[in-house]
Image: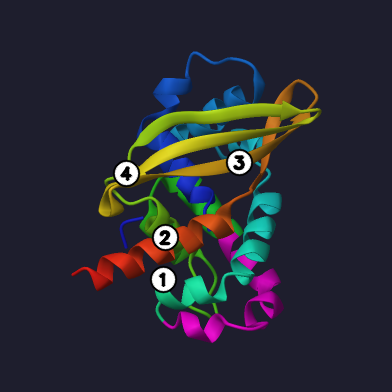
């Protein structure tokens, strides 16, 4: 394995976004700079300051649980994840995803992250799903948009997807915590998975 979706952000920033953002010192974008820097330095404590890992992974599992048809085409044995199975296993899957994120930050290795996760009943890996949205050849293109709504902020990060000759926008939500911002959710993870499933189906039909 070379590479739900927090890792999309990490891969995008680690692939070049940090250097784009390094001049940004304040605001939500600054928090993403610091999160990316923490990944590069393998500083888990600093990473958790700017990313609420439990919140992000919990929201991701909720979103993924609603994407049965997309998972059926993207994940081996994904058809078994239809219905309420994913929702029933959410606590275990969220814990596994949390472990994968921690291991990735500590080692910088997506393979190590996948291997570190606890044994799962279902073959569902955060790193595996991330690799379907952001491939090894993907590049960070820039900020598509950024807006603040009170103590919440939404930032759209555009990344290329050469496999499908297109780009995708990963929207992250952050909240203000005193003197800094903290990422709490990837708001369009379900949309991203559905989009990739459609593109993959189209690619296979055109082969």
Marks 2, 1: nearer the viewer? 2
Residue numbers of the magenta segment? 77-97
Cα–Cα span, label 3 and label 2: 18 Å
2 and 1 marks in contact (CB < 8 Å): yes
Q: Which of pointers 2 and 4 lies earlier in the amino acid sequence?
A: 4
Mark 2, residue position: 196
In this view of the protein, which residue sits in the foreground, 181 or 42? 181
Main secondary structure of the magenta stretch? helix
Is 87 displayed left or right of 141 in the figure?
right
Label 4 environment density (alpha carbons within 10 Å; few <14, some 14–19, many ≥20): some
Q: Which of marks 3 and 1 is nearer the N terminus?
A: 1
- Residue 165 shown left or right of residue 126 in the figure: left
Report the residue at 69% width, 36% height from top: 174
Could you say whether the residue bearing mark 2 is in a helix, strand or loop? helix
Q: Residue at x 56, y 27 (%)?
A: 34
Q: Label 3 neighbourhood size at 10 Å, few (<14), some (14-19), many (20+)?
A: many
Mark 3 lies on residue: 172
Q: Earlier in the sequence, mark 2 or mark 1?
A: 1
Q: Mark 4 points at which residue?
A: 138
Is residue 50 magenta-colored?
no
Callout 1 secondary element: helix
Q: Where is residue 153 in the image (x, y as percent from the top left)?
A: 70, 32
User: What residue lies at 32% left-to-right and 63% top-to-bottom?
Assistant: 1
Q: Where is residue 141 in the image (x, y as percent from the top left)?
A: 38, 32
Q: Nearer the viewer, residue 141 or 85?
A: 141
Question: Distance from label 3 to label 1 (Cα)?
Answer: 23 Å
Q: Residue 53, relative to residue 141: is it above or below?
A: below
């Amino acid at each position: 394995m070379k590479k739900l979706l927090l890792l999309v952000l990490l891969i995008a920033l680690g692939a070049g976004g940090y250097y784009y953002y390094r001049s940004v010192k304040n605001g939500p974008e600054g928090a993403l700079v610091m999160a990316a820097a923490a990944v590069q330095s393998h500083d888990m404590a600093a990473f958790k300051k700017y990313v609420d890992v439990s919140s992000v992974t919990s929201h991701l599992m909720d979103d993924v649980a609603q994407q049965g048809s997309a998972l059926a085409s993207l994940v081996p044995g994904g058809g078994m994840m239809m219905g309420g199975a994913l929702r029933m296993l959410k606590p275990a899957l969220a814990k596994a995803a949390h472990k994968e994120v921690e291991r990735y930050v500590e080692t910088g290795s997506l393979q190590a992250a996948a291997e570190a996760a606890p044994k799962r009943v279902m073959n569902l890996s955060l790193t595996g799903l991330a690799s379907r949205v952001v491939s090894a050849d993907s590049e960070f293109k820039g900020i598509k948009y950024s807006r603040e709504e009170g103590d919440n902020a939404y930032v759209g990060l555009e990344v290329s997807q050469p496999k499908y000759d297109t780009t995708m926008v990963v929207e992250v939500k952050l909240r203000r915590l005193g003197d800094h911002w903290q990422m709490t959710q990837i708001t369009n993870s379900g949309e991203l998975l559905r989009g990739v499933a459609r593109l993959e189906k189209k690619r296979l039909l055109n082969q």
